[in-house]
Amino acid sequence: MEEIVNFADLGEFIDKPVMTYSTGMKSRLGFSTAMNLEPDIFLIDEALGVCDKDFKKKSSDALKKKLSKNVTAIIVSHNERTIKELCTKALFMEHGNSIAFGTPDEIFNLYNKE
């Protein structure tokens, strides 16, 4: 619990009801909880889109550390930098259909042409 609280860096707000948290605060707490688990697969859906740059950096570093231990992450995002930084493969989907699968560079070249 202490590691989750420290990673989330919510300060005095950690003792407040979660229903009073902003979207960013909820995201911090959820991501912090996930980083303190040991699953084989992480599913992350735009979780860092609402966080400040310092927390994004800390989270990215923590996720990279997890990935270096052969943990799989499925990251749903439109953020080119995030995908290129964290992923080795990318899937471009549109309206629930698979458009292309390849390296992040290949997929974002296609995505940016759309």
Image (cartoon, grey):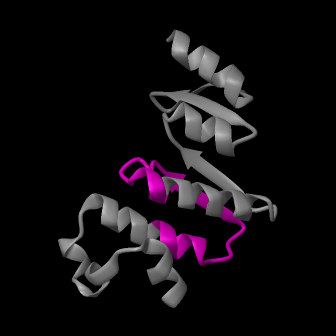
Q: Residue furthest top?
A: 113
User: 110 or 16, which lies in front?
Assistant: 16
Residue at 18%, 73% in the rendered image: 20
How many labels sit on residues?
0
Q: Is residue 56 left or right of residue 89?
A: left
Give how far across and how far down residue 37 sits, in percent: 62, 77
Q: Position of residue 108 (x, y in %)?
A: 61, 22
Residue 102 placement (x, y as % from top left): 74, 28
Side of 79 where 70 appears, left or right: right
In this picture, is 15 found above or below 93?
Answer: below
Nearer to the camera, 76 or 83: 83
Q: Is residue 50 magenta?
A: yes
One can see residue 90 in this view: yes
The vertical placement of 55 against 7, above or below, is above
Q: Dividing the picture into quarters, in which one does residue 100 lie?
A: top right
Residue 43 in the magenta stretch? The answer is yes
Q: Residue 98 in the image: state x and y as whole percent.
A: 60, 28
Can you tell which quarter of the image residue 41 is in? bottom right
Camera sees residue 47:
no
Q: Nearer the viewer, residue 73 or 101?
A: 73
Q: What residue sits 67% from the left and 34% below the top?
A: 90
The residue under the point 55% across, 31% down is 80
What range is drawn magenta here? 31-55
Residue placed farthest to the left in the image? 20
Locate residue 97 relative to residue 52 in the image: left or right: right
Which residue is painted at 24% across and 63% down in the image?
Answer: 22
